[in-house]
Amino acid sequence: MKALRLQAFLARAGVASRRKAEDLIRQGRVRVNGEVASLGQKVGPLDLVEVDGKRVALPQERVVLALHKPKGYTTTRQDPHAQKTVFDLLPEIPGLHPVGRLDRDSEGLLLLTNDGALTHRLTHPRFGVRKVYRVWTEGGTLPKEACRRLLLGVDLEDGPARALACRPAPGGAVLVLGEGRKREVRRMLEAVGYPVKRLLRLKVGPIRLGDLPPGKWRRLSEEEVRALEEAVGKGPLE
């Protein structure tokens, strides 16, 4: 391993996103070789990195999984209010975490990995990874005018949002978004008067849900992982 900036190391180790890792460093919760770390500090393979007194190491092998998340499962590992989480469906893999999220009532493709740097690239709005959703609404098939409004953009409480593509489909629509704010698809459709009854994510970047059954997972092939990397660029995250 070549020397990495500490926040990139923590992200790659799956501790947190790079931004949250920077917060941990600023809070003095990270030590390198027993000393309180500083933001931007570099670490190499012989350095001992600890967060809140617990040693942190890079995963021995990168894993990227695709899961068909069923309705009723949350995407958090520990949620005192959740009866079921996606981790009930998955093998125990150190550092495994969701790439973004799907809310409890949504279904479809969820990627998970132990590579925090890859997660950062796939979820940061700057990289604009496209996600495709099939929705069914209480108002039925979305009219072209509603699609036009979504393409132009709607105002949400956390700022404007717009679809990159929209086409009516029986009972609802197919939408393409370039970001993944909390419940964004649902809030956008509610803003144009078509509340969502069912939401199924079909695609994240180049990865498709395909015929993967609900509740089942598969490991991405090396070709698929390379396609993900190409979708977000391979440059360093420092």
Image (cartoon, grey):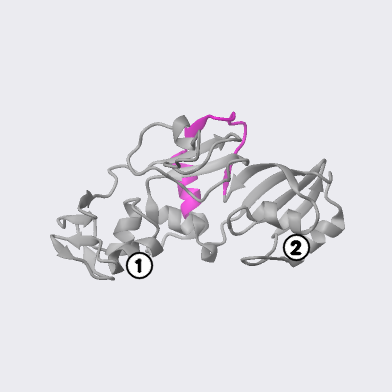
User: Residue 55 vs residue 172: left or right?
Assistant: left
Coordinates of residue 159 in the picture (x, y in percent): 64, 68
User: Residue 174 vs residue 96: left or right?
Assistant: right
The answer for how far apart the CA atoms under marks 2 and 1 are is 34 Å
Q: Extreme front residue here? A: 81
User: Split into 4 quadrants, where in the image is the C terminus?
Assistant: bottom left
Mark number, residue 210: none
Tell me the residue that label 2 is attached to.
151
Q: Give the range drawn in magenta.
A: 206-229
- SS class, disc 1: loop
Image quadrant in which you'd find residue 1: bottom left
Query: What is the three-letter code of the residue carrying label 1?
Result: Glu
Pair 2/1: label in front: 2
Give the total of numbered labels.
2
Coordinates of residue 168 in the picture (x, y in percent): 81, 49
Few, some or many C-alpha atoms within 10 Å of disc 1 (few <14, some 14-19, many ≥20)? few
Sequence-first disc among 2 and 1: 2
Tell me the residue that label 1 is attached to.
238
Query: What is the three-letter code of the residue carrying label 2?
Result: Leu
Whether 219 is among the magenta residues is yes
Few, some or many C-alpha atoms within 10 Å of disc 2 (few <14, some 14-19, many ≥20)? some
Q: Is residue 95 above or below residue 45?
A: above
Of residues 199 and 124, the one nearer the viewer is 199
- SS class, disc 2: helix
The residue under the point 33% across, 52% down is 15
User: Residue 120 vs residue 41: left or right?
Assistant: right
Whether 89 is among the magenta residues is no
Coordinates of residue 108 in the picture (x, y in percent): 61, 39
Image quadrant in which you'd find residue 182: bottom right
The residue under the point 36% across, 33% down is 92
